[in-house]
Every structure is written in C-alpha cells, then in structure tokens.
Amino acid sequence: MDKKYTVAIIGCGRLGQHYAEVYQTLPNTELVAIAEYNPERRQAVGARFDIRALYQDAQDLFRHVVPDIAVVVLPGKYIKEAVIAAAQAGVKGVSTDKPIEARLSDVDAMVEECAARGVVFAGGNLQRAMSEVQEAAGWLRTGEYGPLRGASVHGWGGEISGGGCQHIAVLRLFTQAEITQVTAWGTPPEALARDDDEGLIINGQFLLSNGLVCPVFGQPTPSRGANVWSDDALVRWDWGPPEIFQGCDAQGARIKIDRPYTPLEYPRFSYMGTSVLSFLAVLENGGELYISGHDLRQSLEVAIAAKYSALWGNVPLDLPLADRSLALYPRAYRWLGGDHSGRSQTFEEALEGELFPRSS
C-alpha cells in the first residue's frame, strides 16, 4: 500500500518500547501517538521516539486521535478496557499481549467486541508467531511428515498462564486441533490454592479435537515446550526454532535433520517482528493471523481448566468451559506491571536503554 498505517502504542513500558521501535522501523507504518500513565516515562519515550502526541491513557488518546492500529501493551489488569475502547473508537486493528487478562468472560468480551465491529484482533509477542514455528507448522499441515500419531507438552509449570500460554498456542498450531478436555494434577498444594499461577506445576493430559491424547509433563523432560510426531518424524518446539527428527539410525535412535528455514526479513526483531508483519498482512489482505486474541483466549482457558481440574480432584473438564466467570491470575509483575511489583524502569533506561541487539 502507498499510505502508511498510523499506529498508537498504549502502554509504553519496556515491551511497549520494543513495539515502538518495530513500528518506527517498518516502511508501511507510522507511530503517531503514545499513551503512558507514568509521567516520567511518558516524557522519556516521547523524546526517544520523537512523539509529541502523548497521553495518560487509552481514553484520553482516543479523544484526540483514532489511529489505524492500536497496540495495547498494558499489564493484564488493564487490557480489557483498552482493547474495547480501541475497537469502539474505530481502529482497523488492535493487538495485545500475553497473558490476556485473567477471567474468561473478560476475554470473551474483547473477542466479541472486535468481531462485532470488524476489528482485527491480534495476539502479540508469542513464539507461535516465530517464522520458523509457522514454517514447521506448514510442513506438518501439508502432510510432509505423514499423519500425526501423537503430541506432548513438557515443562508446563511455574506460570501456566503467564508463560504456559506459549505451549498451548504452539500445540494447537502444530496439531491443527483444539483441546476439548483437560484432566490435571497440580503441585505443590500451596501453589494450587493460590489465585495466581505462580509456582504451579501441572501434570495431566489433554484430549484434542483430532482424536489425539496429549500427555502433559510439569517438569522439563529434559526438553520443554511441545512435541508432535508421526510414524517417521518428530517435530520439537523447545523455545526456539523447532528441531526436526526424521527416520532412525542403526541403533533405533531418531535422526535429527538440518532442514533450513527461510531467512527473516527483520532478524533483529525476531518473532516480535514476524508477529507484527503478520498483523499488517492480515489488515491489508485478510487471512489468518500468526497469533490472535482468540489464540490467547484458548491458552488462558486451558490453563484455567487445568488449575480447576486439579483443584477439584483431577476431574476431567470439557472445553469450552461453561462457567465463564472462572479466572486464573498471572504473577504480579504481569498483572499490575513492573512499577507496582518491584520491577520499575528508570527514566534513563526508558530514554536510551538498548531494546534489540545491534549485531543481528
């Protein structure tokens, strides 16, 4: 397109500053406004990104400007209000990030508001949007390694919503299936009794809509992430480009193959860059997002189901959950933000701290 998409960042802490640099770098986007509640940081990021249209919050911003794209990078507690305000203001697309709120009904409201208004609702900076993950998923989808025979999740513990959303998003992509039932055991007991996901380790199983049964290991085994396999191959996502094994050696062990991935257009930005590029492509041409608000909802719902399955005596819980009032809060720094959880950012860091590696 000849015309650039105008972009507003809503929440310009550390992660929001990364998004600001990406959107200022891309040739078809123009950063025009920033909303940031912290007055010192608002001053710093305004100077850093040469933006004069600075506002305290989303409501104040939308009273003055309606961008094409709203990039919501707020702590979880404040995401719903900003996403719905963006959709109601008339943006073409809105993105948010993980973890997406805590209560299912709140996420439902965001997804439904965007859908009703024809607003593209993107999901942000998750490894599901990594180019290599998407490319490996494409090979699986076209049947290059044969029909899937199994799937597993590893290291699903510590933050099953705040971090574990990554596992679920990749698992659903690789299997091209939804999780239809969750049965779980949770440990330690004190973590299971908490309202948030801090320290909770989940073991159990997922039933998938394609008929697969997916065991869930709370600890690394030693890999983390998600595996899927066919009769001849195994694809392993372990927090990076997927590893691919095909065939077996004389001893019967799997053989790792070195299949090259397509080079990135903006390697310095890693999967944040590919997530944003996917968002822009869907805004321009339609299609399927690498990571969507719906994907984030599915990850949250699985985490909530696992927590309550374990809490209620390892009962199988069918998805979608009937009780949309159920919730699972992320850790305080994700829910309230660094300024309110001991991870505050200095003025100097906001003004000139390095955001992305310069060497790549």
Image (spheres, grey):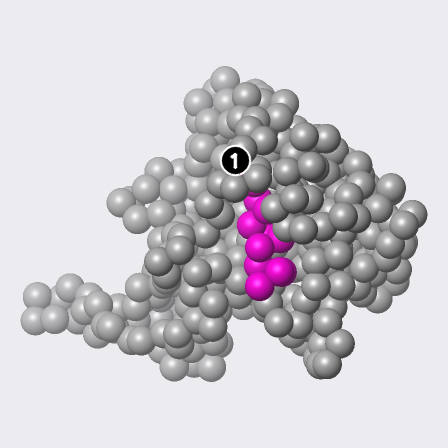
- Quadrant housing residue 161: top right
Residue 346: horizontal and vertical position, in percent? 55, 29
Where 325 sits versus 114, above or below? above
User: Is 24 inside the magenta-drawn segment?
Assistant: yes
Query: In the depicted view, which residue is nearer to us: 14 or 134?
Result: 14
Picture residue at 46% right of the left edge, 27% below the top: 199
Mostly what secondary structure, the magenta segment?
Answer: helix
Q: What stretch is highlighted in magenta?
A: 14-25
What is the tally of numbered marks visible in this picture?
Answer: 1
Q: Which residue is drawn at 50% across and 22% down?
A: 191
Place of residue 80 in the rendered image (x, y in percent of width and height, measured from the top left): 77, 42
* Displayed quadrant of residue 13: top right
- Residue 174 seen from this side: no
- Which amino acid type is marked by label 1? Glu
Task: Relative to 336, say whether 318 is above or below.
Answer: below
Q: Which residue is drawn at 31% across and 64% down?
A: 243
Where residue 332 appears, x then y in whole percent?
59, 26
Give 177 or 344, whichever is nearer the viewer.
Answer: 344
Residue 103 image position (x, y, % from top left): 72, 37
Name the residue at the top extreme. 190
Asked whether, in this view, residue 136 is left or right of residue 74, the answer is left
Q: Which residue is drawn at 30% across and 68% down?
A: 244
Residue position marked by numbered label 1 in the rendering: 349
Residue 71 appears anywhere in the view: yes
Q: Indicate whether 158 appears above or below 134.
A: above
Is residue 35 rendered magenta in the image? no
User: Which image quarter is the N terminus in?
Assistant: bottom right
Secondary element at tag 1: helix
- Mark 1 residue crowding within 10 angstroms, few (<14) / some (14–19) / many (20+): some
